[in-house]
Structure formats: structure tokens, C-alpha cells
Image (spheres, rainbow, N blue to C red):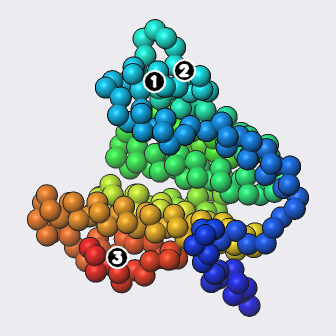
Amino acid sequence: MQDTKLEQPLIDFYMYPPIGDDDWRYLYQTALVRMYEMQMLTRATLLDMANAESLEAAASFLTATEYALPQAGRDFAEMQDVLRIRRQAIRQLFADLMLDKSIVRLFRTRDDFANIRLALRRTLTGKPIGAGYSNDGNLPPEWLEEVFEQENYKLLPDFLQAAIDQVVLAYYQNKDIRQIDYAVDNVQAEYNLKRARQLRSIFLLGLFRIQIDLTNIRTMLRLKFTESEQGPRLAGTERNVFLSGGYIDLERLQHGL
């Protein structure tokens, strides 16, 4: 019997998503994160950056922060590099602070799915496997590239094999590249909810349900934009692309579409 408390968590709008019971093992980690929060950019700083006249003027507000750019040759590419480095540092900090390494592995599957998505896009459209894969997943990109080049997908975890099977089946129905994203999103959402229940984490279950809602809203808006640009030509199968398991009823999303 499934735990009904995990299946239908109460929504506390002062603490959303719900966090469940206190875990006193993380007392030190919580205090450390609170300290780091004091170093985050303030809302006033972000507003000043948004209203700046140029990228260089916006970057000047970051001078005394960890996001500071070199004084010479500031451009958008350098900004992306700095953000990428800081994101890697934050993810590593998360991994170091977490006592539950299974949760770390779960969050790293986000990049595994992203790498699979990219590899499938290139493979199914006849392009080279190439490079540009994330190093933040559980699977090394070099090993993943070798698996795709040899088409030895049985070496992959079961959930990634399921993603590949669904993608291939969906894509070759009409060779619509959007079906790759829909299929990967579907398998990833199902996997996240399944692991959250296995870990008995009320917070993760709520978080993943919110992510499903956001993905569905994005899908709805993309399809509506496609209809407005190309006319109402969406087939019934294309409307059946919403992920189940979120807080928003699928009927509401279909009605909005």
C-alpha cells in the first residue's frame, strides 16, 4: 500500500513545496546555507543590473562579488563562462553537504537526461554525436558518446534505456523532432516521482510535481504559439503531450490549449 501522506502532501503556502518533518542531521548544513544566503545578490542589485544601459555597466555591479568579470574585454561569452563556473561550484557544494548521496545521484540524473536528449537529437537527425555534453551527470560524457557510437544501449541504466525506446518510437511516427523532447520529459518526470516516493521525501515529491506543472505550461504556450503562427493544424496526437503527476489537472491545460 502506498503512503497516502507521500501521495497527497498537504500544501502549506507559507512553505511551498512542503518540506515534511525536520531532519536534525542537517543542522550544520542548514546554518552554513543561511550564511551563504547573506552573500547572495540583493533584489536592488538585480534591478540596477536590469536597468543598466549596457552589459559592461551591468557587469560593474558584480565587481565585489564571486561573479566579477575581468576589467578588460567584458562580453556575454565571458559572463556565461563565469555563470557556468559558479553553477558547477554550487552543485559541488550541494553534493558535499548532502548526507543522503542517493539524493545527489537523483539530481545528477537531470544532466544524464539532458545528455541523452542531445545525443538522440543528433543521432536521429543524422548528425555526428559530437561534443558539448554536461560533465555534471552520473555518467561520464566520453563513456556516453562511446555507447551511442556503438549503439550498445544495454549498458545504460534502465530508465535511460526506457527514454531511448520512447524517443525512437515517438520520433519515427512522423519524424517530428519535438517528440524527442516530449518523450524524454515524460520518462524523466515518471522517474523523478518514482524515486521521490522510494526515498519517502515529501519535499522532493512536491518539487517534482511543481516542475511537471512548469513543463506543461511551457509546452502549452509553445503549442499555442505554433498554432498562432502556422494556423490550427495540430493533430490530436500532438495535443496529448502533457505530463501527468503535477498539481494542475490535465483537463485544465488541454482547455487552455
Residue 236 lies, with reference to residue 92, above or below; the image says: below
**Residue occupying image coordinates x 31% and y 67%:** 220
Q: Residues within 10 Å of mark 2 (few under 14, many from 20)?
A: few
Is 250 left or right of 198, judged from the image as shown?
Answer: left
Q: Where is residue 144 in the image (x, y as percent from the top left)?
A: 59, 43
Residue 65 lies, with reference to residue 211, above or below; the image says: above
Residue marked by disc 2: 63
Q: Do the residues labelled 2 and 1 touch (CB within 8 Å)?
A: yes
Is 94 left or right of 150, judged from the image as shown?
Answer: right
Residue marked by disc 3: 253
Q: Where is residue 115 in the image (x, y as percent from the top left)?
A: 53, 46
Q: Position of residue 81 (x, y in %)?
A: 51, 26
As rendered, which of 168 and 65 lies closer to the eye?
65
Instruction: Identify residue type, mark 1.
Output: Ala
Query: Which of the two labelled residues, at mark 1 and mark 3, occupies the earlier sequence position?
Result: 1
Residue marked by disc 1: 59
**Residue occupying image coordinates x 70% and y 84%:** 5
**Residue occupying image coordinates x 35% and y 81%:** 252
